[in-house]
Image (cartoon, rainbow, N blue to C red):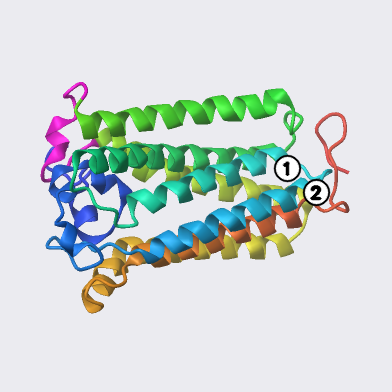
């Protein structure tokens, strides 16, 4: 597989502003005077992403409080865990994609540390989101210690595993990932956990919720909210992976795809909350003994 692009981050880092790129030497050593401007490798930083991150944190806190008022809602605590994960991601974005300097050893360690937390939080949070899709089927009682414990423990395992690989890559603890520091930045572990696993989790959540809404609840309107959330997230990813380099070049580094990716992801999270809220109304069918719905 050495001749394939699987596991390589070079092209992604060249054309987009991904937090994972902070880990690699080629993209780490950036002139401080170029922050906010077009980089020599086609990257640019954007302080506007910091503003979106702050807004995302405030919106998420608001949604957590709103969810707390829906005391009879199925999966209330589990969905709040997802929102807490999104808050952690947003906090990390301030340090990882906000264009903070890495000119001194201390600054570099801070950014690399937050990058590891950022990557781990992305994987763990989307895992929690997928598990929220299972919670709706009421296989076990939602909001109970066993439900929350299983979600937290499994998410913690993914968070620690992803974070360790990121830290080992950045700080060369074991030397196992040293070869990924330079072109083509090949790191299969991070590629699978950071690029592929979240996509699988998102697709799983969408499939599970589609089955729940159409086959179990027998409703169609909530699907509009779910489809809107999926569309908004997809648009954000297009800005990040496809359009970013063109925006960055066309605006002389003043704007890049990270700003729009953060914005559309925030909108997708809000729409996901609207979807969840719409299927937890009091008049939906409720599970009874034996696992059936009435």
Sequence-first disc among 2 and 1: 2
Q: Residue furthest bottom?
A: 250
Residue at point 51%, 65% (across, down): 232
Q: Residue 132 colored magenta?
A: no
> 216 or 18, which is in the foreground?
18
Whole-percent x, y for residue 79 in the image: 65, 43
Q: Determine which quarter of the picture holds residue 270.
A: bottom right
Instruction: Count up the numbered dots.
Output: 2
Numbered label attached to residue 70: 2
Whole-percent x, y for residue 161 in the image: 38, 27
In the displayed structure, would residue 238 be above or below residue 159? below
In the displayed structure, would residue 89 be above or below residue 232? above
Residue at point 82%, 37% (across, down): 292
In screen coordinates, is 292 left or right of 246? Answer: right
Dot 2 and dot 1 residues touching (CB under 8 Å):
yes
Residue at mark 1: 76
In screen coordinates, is 165 left or right of 72? Answer: left
Whole-percent x, y for residue 102 in the image: 22, 48
**Magenta segment, prevailing SS (helix, strand or loop):** loop
Determine crowd level at label 1: few under 14, some 14-19, many 20+ residues with C-alpha closer than 10 A. many
Please, what secondary structure does the residue beneath circle 1 have? helix
Q: Is residue 75 visible?
A: no
Whole-percent x, y for residue 69 in the image: 80, 49
Q: Quadrant of the C terminus?
A: top right
Q: Residue 182 colored magenta?
A: yes
Residue at point 21%, 74% (across, down): 249
| Start-end of magenta stretch | 173-187
Please, what secondary structure does the residue beneath circle 2 have? loop
Q: Determine which quarter of the picture holds residue 221.
A: bottom right
Q: Quadrant of the N terminus?
A: top left
In screen coordinates, is 93 left or right of 25? Answer: right
Numbered label attached to residue 290: none
């Amino acid at each position: 597989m050495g001749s394939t692009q699987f596991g390589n981050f070079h092209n992604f880092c060249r054309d987009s502003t991904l937090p994972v790129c902070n880990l690699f030497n080629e993209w780490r050593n950036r002139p401080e005077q170029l922050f906010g401007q077009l980089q020599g490798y086609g990257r640019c930083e954007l302080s506007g992403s910091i503003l979106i991150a702050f807004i995302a944190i405030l919106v998420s806190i608001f949604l957590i409080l709103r969810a707390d008022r829906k005391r009879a809602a199925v999966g209330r605590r589990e969905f709040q865990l997802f929102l807490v994960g999104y808050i952690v991601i947003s906090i990390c974005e301030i340090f990882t994609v906000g264009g903070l300097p890495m000119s001194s050893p201390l600054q570099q360690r801070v950014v690399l540390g937050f990058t590891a937390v950022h990557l781990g939080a992305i994987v763990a949070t989307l895992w929690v989101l997928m598990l929220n899709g299972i919670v709706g089927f009421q296989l076990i009682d939602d909001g109970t210690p066993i439900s929350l414990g299983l979600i937290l423990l499994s998410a913690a395992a993914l968070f620690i595993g992803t974070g360790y690989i990121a830290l080992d890559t950045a700080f060369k603890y074991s030397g196992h990932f040293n070869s990924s520091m330079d072109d083509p930045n090949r790191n299969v572990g991070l590629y699978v956990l950071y690029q592929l696993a979240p996509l699988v989790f998102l697709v799983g959540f969408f499939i599970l919720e589609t089955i729940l809404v159409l086959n179990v609840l027998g409703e169609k309107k909530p699907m509009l909210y779910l489809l809107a959330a999926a569309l908004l997230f997809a648009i954000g990813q297009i800005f990040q992976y496809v359009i970013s380099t063109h925006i960055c070049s066309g605006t002389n580094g003043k704007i890049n795809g990270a700003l729009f990716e953060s914005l559309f992801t925030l909108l997708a999270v809000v729409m996901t909350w609207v979807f969840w809220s719409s299927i937890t109304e009091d008049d939906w069918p409720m599970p009874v003994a034996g696992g059936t719905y009435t």
